[in-house]
Amino acid sequence: MAIPVILDVDTGLDDACALLLAALHPDLDLRAVTCVAGNADVDQVVRNTQVVLAAAGRHEVPVARGATRPLLEPARPARHVHGEDGLGDLDHAALGLPTEPAEVDQRHAVELLRDELLAAVSAGEPVILVPLGPLTNIALLLRSYPETAKGLARIVFMGGAAAVGNATAAAEFNVWHDPEAAAIVLDAARELQVPVTMYGLDVFYDVRITLDEADLLLAMQQPAGRLAGALIRAQCERFAATSATIGDAGAVCAVLDPAGLTTASLAVHVELAGARTRGQTVVDQRQWVGDLDHDPHGIPPTQVDVALGVDGERWRALWLAAVGRSGSGDTGR
């Protein structure tokens, strides 16, 4: 049976790569997509998400609008990476993409997540939740409706890092954008006994598609293939490179093919107070269990499966095979 998944997105270029994979791969049952402010404002995220799902022929997947900003701070869109519209400022008409928005689910994203997860509890079919943006919606969900945790098989989120940052020298963008939400999600997941995988910057850039492969996709007749090629080409042009990462799509690959990912169960803490380290995921990789009296913090209580290595070639082939599908009809339930 196909794996039931829900994506929570802030659809920019790499979220779009992930959405295409989740919408087109026959081994995934994409139940819903919820949207959060991050790479772009939340209304643009909703629009971008609708465009991607329409290109994949998945009009039936419910899309809901969620949090418009982080819990405590204003939204800070990443236009310098994803363009003014969050989707690389692509020429939609030239790619054959829809120009009119589809209908949005009238429920708030948190309500849609609640309803889908409670339905999963009733059906005895736990869902894998894949957050690809700031964790604002997920924090609100788990604190407002903790009973929904029984409908979660696992949370696989794109965010954080064991060793590097991008929004700052210490912090990855999704966690940095709403660090309180990230801290709440990790704390709630521990309390509610939901397993968590952190797909962070340590592996984020290691699954790459070449410019030549992007041009082959652009030459396809199907909108999904053309969009996939355009997403890669837009990144290559923006960063003057001959290849681009599929980024967030790696978190979806981790659901489809977990054997392609090397993880370690490690204690993780989200730094909230540091002047230069706010938003950092502090990953405790100490390999000893000796006297910790000298460490006033001790070991963080939350254990996370942290991604430390990935088979980039294996997942590159996985993504290319999926986005090369027709996308010409509904493939879900």
Image (cartoon, helix red, strand yellow):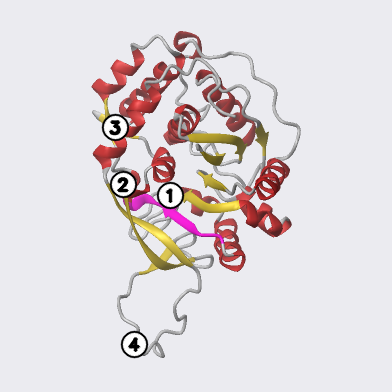
Residue 167, disc: 1
**Residue at x 36% of width, y 90% of height:** 291
**Residue at x 51% of width, y 28% of height:** 84
Q: Position of residue 107 (x, y in %)?
A: 75, 37
Residue 317, disc: 3
The type of residue carrying mark 2 is Gly
Q: Residues within 10 Å of mark 2 (few under 14, many from 20)?
A: some
Q: Residues within 10 Å of mark 4 (few under 14, many from 20)?
A: few
Which region is colored magenta?
194-202
Measured in 3D between alpha carbons, the distance from the residue under mark 4 to the one under mark 2, in whole angstroms, is 33 Å
Label 1 close to label 3 by CB (< 8 Å): no
The type of residue carrying mark 3 is Ala
Badge 1 or badge 4: first in the primary sequence: 1
Measured in 3D between alpha carbons, the distance from the residue under mark 1 to the one under mark 3, in whole angstroms, is 29 Å
Badge 2 or badge 3: first in the primary sequence: 2
**Residue at x 49% of width, y 32% of height:** 19
The type of residue carrying mark 1 is Ala
The image quarter containing residue 212 is: top left
The type of residue carrying mark 4 is Gly
The vertical placement of 78 against 268, above or below, is above
